[in-house]
Image: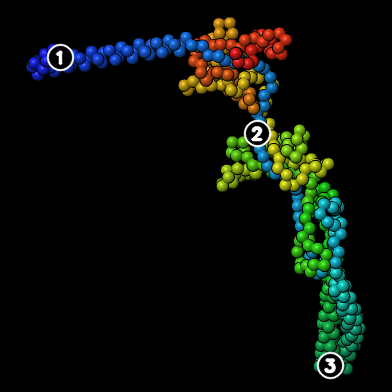
């Protein structure tokens, strides 16, 4: 109370000076306390030890793999359709049947086309008869014209008589040429009728590929009235079969025709199929930013079927003697990527910047520094700073089925 009364009795100038001094003292005490707290906290961190799990740096094989998913499609597929209209009289194959090159797969009702052939044959006979008549008339007209020329030279026939004989000959010659053309026309009509008749026997044929293919689908049944080009069945080639995968621009430029591809399917767990890249699209689709890649796979036993979902694996590179660490051991400190090397004797962790190469599954290749050795921290590394103390797992006791001493692989208790 006396201090308060004394403060009240001070002049305004003294009050201001007293307040400034008090404020400076408070600021000084706050800064000193903060520094002491930071120092104590920092010392505590350096002195704290982190329990870790370590793993040795290994040397071995690592591969740079591209993983893709895709679908199986037939290597080739086409629909068999009649070239002429008619009623489907007989269908000789069904879904799943084997079809050989040139095999008759269906038969149309051919009665109408047989009648057309008979009509064309009759028309040809008439045309040939007219042709023979026109040839005989031409030969007769030619003889008359030659006789008229002889008589005209002797002065027996007048010019008008010679002109009449010439005109008669030319008329017969023209009629002969017309009959000759009619014969050719009727022969062509007969050939056309025969071809159309042959089209009633529907044949499955193809130019290249395997001799044996299979019926994929049936579109119509016997008795259906078909128009020309109506699909009847589809023919698919299954040996080899084609896998279609899609690659983003990241993998696209690494894929080359002829590269081997490993194929797997959940339908056949544990079994691998092997093919090779046969086609790579020259563009990436704008909508998906992916390019189509086709892989041919031998399918002699016919296990792989169109429409199946598959996984494809393409090996882009491999290292036989790479320095390997668990990928989880790689951490980032600041702007540097590295690992923590464990000093098993001094129980210290040292941060080692590294350059990572190929990553395959849970393993990573260390390109730099070359010849890396020792143990790396694989659990607890995210709590570490350079130089911190570490707590290692206790070595397993003999007979407990644990790793031997010096090869720690699990956390301590």
Residue 19 in sight: yes
Split into 4 quadrants, where in the image is the C terminus? top right
- Say which label, 3 or 2, has the lower sequence index: 2
Query: Residue 187, can we see it?
Result: no
How far apart are labels 1 and 3 at the CA level? Answer: 169 Å
Q: Quadrant of residue 248?
A: top right
Q: Quadrant of the N terminus?
A: top left
- 253, 2: nearer the viewer: 2
Question: Which color scheme does this rendered protein use?
Answer: rainbow
Q: Is residue 285 above or below residue 317?
A: below
Nearest to viewer (mark 1 / mark 2): 1
Given this view, does label 3 or label 2 mark the residue nearer the observer?
A: 2
Which residue is located at x 83 percent, y 41 percent?
A: 301
User: Quick one: SS at disc 3?
Assistant: helix
The residue singled out by tag 3 in the image is: 161
Q: Kindly report the distance in space between the C-alpha atoms of the residues bearing marks 1 and 2.
A: 84 Å
Q: Position of residue 97 (x, y in %)?
A: 84, 52
Q: Is residue 212 left or right of residue 229?
A: right
Establish if 30 lies above or below 66: above
Residue 98 to residue 44: above or below: below
- Residue receiving disc 1: 1
Q: Which residue is mark 2?
A: 66
- Residue 133 in percent (x, y) is at 90, 83
The answer to whether 351 appears left or right of 361 in the picture is: left
Mark 1 or 3 closer to N-term? 1
Residue located 11% across and 15% down the image: 5
Q: Residue at x 81, y 90 (%)?
A: 163
Q: Secondary structure at mark 1?
A: loop
Tell me if mark 2 has few (under 14), some (14-19) or many (20+) residues whose alpha carbon lies within 10 angstroms of its own.
Answer: some
């Amino acid at each position: 109370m006396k201090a308060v009364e004394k403060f009240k009795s001070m002049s305004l100038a003294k009050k201001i000076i007293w307040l400034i001094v008090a404020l400076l003292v408070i600021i000084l005490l706050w800064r000193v306390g903060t520094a002491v707290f930071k120092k104590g906290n920092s010392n505590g961190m350096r002195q704290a030890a982190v329990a870790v799990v370590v793993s040795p740096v290994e040397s071995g094989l690592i591969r740079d793999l591209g993983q893709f998913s895709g679908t199986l499609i037939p290597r080739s597929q086409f629909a068999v359709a009649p070239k002429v209209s008619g009623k489907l009289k007989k269908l000789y194959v069904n879904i799943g049947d084997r079809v050989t090159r040139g095999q008759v797969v269906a038969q149309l009702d051919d009665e109408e086309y047989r009648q057309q052939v008979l009509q064309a044959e009759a028309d040809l006979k008439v045309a040939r008869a007219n042709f023979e008549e026109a040839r005989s008339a031409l030969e007769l007209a030619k003889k008359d014209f030659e006789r008229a020329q002889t008589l005209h030279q002797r002065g027996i026939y007048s010019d008008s008589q010679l002109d009449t004989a010439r005109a008669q000959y030319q008329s017969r010659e023209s009629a002969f040429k017309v009959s000759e053309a009619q014969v050719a026309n009727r022969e062509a009509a007969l050939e056309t009728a025969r071809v159309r008749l042959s089209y009633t026997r529907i044949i499955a044929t193809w130019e290249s590929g395997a001799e044996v293919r299979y019926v994929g689908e049936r579109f119509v049944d016997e008795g259906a009235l078909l128009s020309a080009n109506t699909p009847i069945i589809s023919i698919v080639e299954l040996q080899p079969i084609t896998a279609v995968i899609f690659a983003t621009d990241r993998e696209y430029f690494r894929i080359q025709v002829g590269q081997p591809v490993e194929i797997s399917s959940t339908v056949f767990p544990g079994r691998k199929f092997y093919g090779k890249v046969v086609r790579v699209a020259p563009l990436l689709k704008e909508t998906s930013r992916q390019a189509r890649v086709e892989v041919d796979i031998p399918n002699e036993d016919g296990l792989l079927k169109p429409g199946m979902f598959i996984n494809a694996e393409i090996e882009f590179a491999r290292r036989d003697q790479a320095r390997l660490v668990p990928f989880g051991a790689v951490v980032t400190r600041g702007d540097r990527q590295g690992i923590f090397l464990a000093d098993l004797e001094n129980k210290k962790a040292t941060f080692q910047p590294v350059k990572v190469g190929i990553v395959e599954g849970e393993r990573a290749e260390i390109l730099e520094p070359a010849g890396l050795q020792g143990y790396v921290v694989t659990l607890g590394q995210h709590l570490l700073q350079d130089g911190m103390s570490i707590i290692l797992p206790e070595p397993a006791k003999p007979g407990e089925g644990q790793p031997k001493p010096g090869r720690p692989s699990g956390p301590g208790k």
